Image: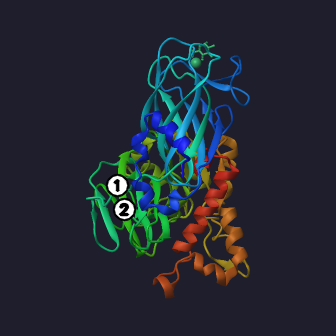
């Protein structure tokens, strides 16, 4: 809890509205956590500065400050972590030696949270602070100061975060049916949305998971004691159709569907807002990647979402049966995805399973075309070699399992070579999944894939939910090894 002195200071800064006591009553677990203040320097990665890091006006902390370019949108961004959900107080240390205010938007995890104005401080070496309250989610969050006038930001030295009390949960959302599981439907257009769920109940214990759209898991089941409400924020991609882009397995419903399942789902609030400029991770792939609408099939892209924090979003264009060539040409697939790609978005490209008779030249040609078109849009292509099949010869996987295709092309090797020729990062999911499947061995590895007895289907190619989760973990490992921009959004 805040000390009276801190509380008084905040009240005098005009933040009374965020300190309404109700949140303390409904969330004793959150409210009892200690207040901790942490400083983040504007000059230290993962902070970013759309300008230069300068040190010519003294009085700053650390080794310098962000001198943003004098233009709209030239931002100073901080990546902060907190263990607590709820309202946090941010304090920006800045200097504005000019004569006019410098207004800016504050974006939290890509969504505009509030506007602030950085008033003149009299001189560039005269530093002061600006304080505001923002909602953070447990884990990593981005806080972006984005100027809205042509003068840009003031010089920004650092940002302090003080985790505070939880806000009052907004209450039962009218878009949700009081059923078990709890099913909610928001009538909104395709796009990216910031979704915040208050999970738990003031009177009753709960056990609640959260998934969106076509069986896209965002939160595995969490247990909450009576009186404990935890806040969870995600950026969610809404597409129409909602599962596979060609509609295989069902087209779902237009708008955003959110399901709270678990053994005793409890919900105390749910808000949905348009997300501003999130990092989008597009997936171009096949049935091992895609959002499978029908159980027991599960693509690894469906579980990647649980590993990604708000501010970044997975847009899964994977589709069953697609090869490098069919994905490139089918109007529902690459041609639909391409115009949506914006600067710095990631596009993970995984093909091989259905390139059974593709020649080496055609495979390279298809991938090269996708890579070039992603780059045309300012996006960053990433090649992902296909996950192995479970086909053993003794204790080792067969060439077919390793995607040597029917005309003798070593598809993963082609992808690795293309990656180095075109300077495209490669996540070697073939090698990673080979190591995993072989280390588990011919019997134990069965549970990574669909099993006849459990799932009513077996092909040793498609993953169980467990296997899809393990594949998602291997992709995450590759994202870290290649230090892709998604790293700062991993949970
Ligand atoms: C001056 C000052 C910079 C500042 C800039 C501005 O050039 O030295 O530190 O960033 O004005 O107007 O933004
Ligand atoms: Ca400047």
The outermost residue toward the bottom is 453
Please say if 97 is above or below 394. above
Query: Quick one: 106 or 95, which is closer to the camera?
Result: 95
Mark 1 — residue?
Answer: 170
The reply to whether residue 231 is in sight is yes
Mark 2, Cα crowd under 10 Å, few <14 / some 14-19 / many 20+, is some
Dots 2 and 1: beta carbons under 8 Å?
A: yes
| Nearest to the observer: residue 55 or residue 389 | 55
Does 39 sit above or below residue 32?
Answer: above
Q: Badge 1 local density, few (<14 within 10 Å), some, or many (20+)?
A: few
Of residue 21 and residue 476, the one placed in the foreground of this image is 21
Q: CA distance from mark 2 to mark 1?
A: 7 Å
Task: Please identify the quadrant where the C terminus is shown.
Answer: bottom right
Provide the residue designation for mark 2. Answer: 268
Q: Quick check: which quadrant has ligand 2?
A: top right
Q: How many marks?
A: 2
Residue 485, horizontal then vertical, whole percent:
60, 44
**Seen in the image, is 188 located left or right of residue 79?**
left
């Amino acid at each position: 809890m805040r000390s009276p002195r801190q509380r008084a200071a905040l009240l005098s800064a005009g933040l009374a509205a965020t300190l309404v006591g109700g949140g303390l009553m409904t969330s004793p677990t959150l409210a009892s956590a200690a207040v901790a203040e942490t400083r983040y320097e504007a000059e230290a990665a993962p902070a970013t500065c759309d300008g230069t890091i300068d040190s010519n006006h003294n009085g700053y902390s650390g080794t310098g400050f962000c001198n943003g370019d004098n233009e709209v949108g030239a931002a100073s961004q901080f990546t902060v972590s907190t263990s607590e959900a709820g309202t946090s107080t941010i304090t920006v240390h800045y200097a504005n030696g000019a004569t006019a205010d410098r207004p800016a938007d504050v974006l939290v995890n890509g969504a505009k949270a509030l506007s602030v104005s950085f008033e003149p401080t009299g001189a560039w070496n005269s530093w002061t602070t600006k304080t505001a309250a923002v909602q953070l989610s447990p884990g990593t969050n981005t806080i972006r100061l984005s100027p809205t006038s042509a003068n840009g930001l003031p010089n920004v030295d650092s940002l302090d975060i003080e985790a505070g009390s939880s806000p009052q949960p907004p209450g039962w959302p009218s878009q949700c049916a009081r059923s078990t599981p709890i099913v909610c439907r928001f009538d909104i257009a395709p796009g990216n949305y910031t979704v915040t769920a208050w999970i738990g109940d003031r009177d009753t214990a709960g056990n609640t998971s959260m998934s969106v759209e076509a069986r896209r898991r965002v939160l595995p089941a969490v247990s909450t004691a009576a009186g404990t409400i935890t806040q969870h924020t995600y950026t969610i991609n809404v597409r129409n159709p909602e599962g596979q882009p060609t509609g295989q397995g069902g087209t779902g419903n237009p708008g955003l569907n959110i399901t709270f399942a678990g053994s005793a789902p409890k919900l105390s609030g749910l808000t949905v807002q348009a997300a501003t400029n999130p990092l989008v991770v597009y997936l171009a792939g096949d049935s091992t990647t895609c959002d499978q609408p029908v159980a027991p099939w599960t693509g690894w892209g469906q579980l990647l979402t649980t590993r990604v924090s708000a501010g970044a979003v997975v847009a899964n264009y994977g589709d069953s049966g697609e090869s490098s060539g069919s994905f490139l040409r089918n109007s529902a697939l690459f041609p639909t995805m391409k115009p949506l790609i914006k600067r710095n978005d990631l596009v993970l490209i995984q093909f091989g399973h259905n390139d059974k008779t593709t020649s080496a030249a055609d495979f390279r040609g298809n991938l090269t075309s996708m890579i070039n078109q992603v780059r045309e849009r300012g996006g960053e292509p990433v090649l992902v070699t296909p996950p192995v099949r479970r086909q053993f010869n003794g204790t080792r996987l067969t060439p077919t399992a390793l995607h040597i295709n029917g005309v003798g092309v070593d598809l993963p090797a082609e992808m690795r070579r293309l990656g180095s020729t075109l300077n495209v990062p490669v996540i070697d999911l073939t090698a990673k999944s080979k190591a995993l499947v072989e280390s588990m061995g011919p019997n134990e590895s069965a549970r990574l894939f669909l099993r006849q007895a459990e799932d009513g289907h077996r092909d040793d190619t498609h993953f169980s939910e467990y296997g899809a989760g393990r594949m998602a973990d291997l992709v995450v490992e590759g994202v870290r090894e290649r230090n892709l921009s998604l790293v700062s959004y991993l949970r």
